Image (cartoon, rainbow, N blue to C red):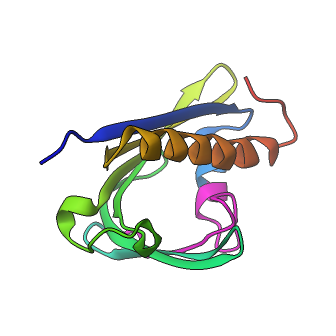
Amino acid sequence: MTDRHIATASTFVAQPPERVWAELHHPGARWMLGANIESDFKVGSPITFEGHFFGRAFQDHGTVLAYERPHLVRFTHFSPLSGLEDVPENYHDIRIELDPADGGTRITVIQENIDTPEHAAHSQQQWEQALGTLAHSDGARRR
């Protein structure tokens, strides 16, 4: 098996963790690259991500691994658009952590089990964009 890689991204939102948590889980939220996210967020339940990315429809899926309101959601993630086989070895492990910080919330995303350094860099850019969208939704500037 080849070495696996990690992508991380973090931003500050000038709202308390409960408010940011609500935005992350709002049924109409599109902060994650325009994806519609569906799950009951119970450990072991499915989670799906549907939308369009650069004109291509996608339907990604995974399983909820941890859910600790309002601080942590962790899930597996597989994208058929990756061209990889849909087997557990090709699923990403994604953690979204919310921590109170200086009058707001620090959001950190850690995506593990990425197949190449190039895909890890691409994932990091996508998470930075997604978190930037979320951070700007509160009208405050990022820091």
Magenta segment, prevailing SS (helix, strand or loop): loop
For the magenta stretch, what is the residue range?
Answer: 22-42
Q: Position of residue 11 (x, y in %)?
A: 63, 32
Reply above or below: 10 against 74: above
Identify the residue at horizontal 65%, vertical 49% (top origin). Answer: 130
Query: In this figure, what is the number of numbered marks?
Result: 0
In this image, 87 relative to 135: left or right? Answer: left
Reply above or below: 5 against 74: above
Q: Position of residue 100 (x, y in %)?
A: 56, 29
Q: Nearer the viewer, residue 59 or 142?
A: 59
Q: Position of residue 68 (x, y in %)?
A: 38, 51
Tell whether position 28 is magenta.
yes
Identify the residue at horizontal 25%, vertical 42% (top origin). Answer: 4
Identify the residue at horizontal 42%, vertical 66% (top origin). Answer: 82
Reply above or below: 22 against 48: above
Tell whether position 25 is magenta.
yes
In this image, 20 relative to 75: left or right? Answer: right
Using the rendered image of the protein, determine whether residue 82 is visible from the camera's viewpoint: yes
Q: Position of residue 94 (x, y in %)?
A: 38, 50
Identify the residue at horizontal 29%, vertical 61% (top origin). Answer: 91
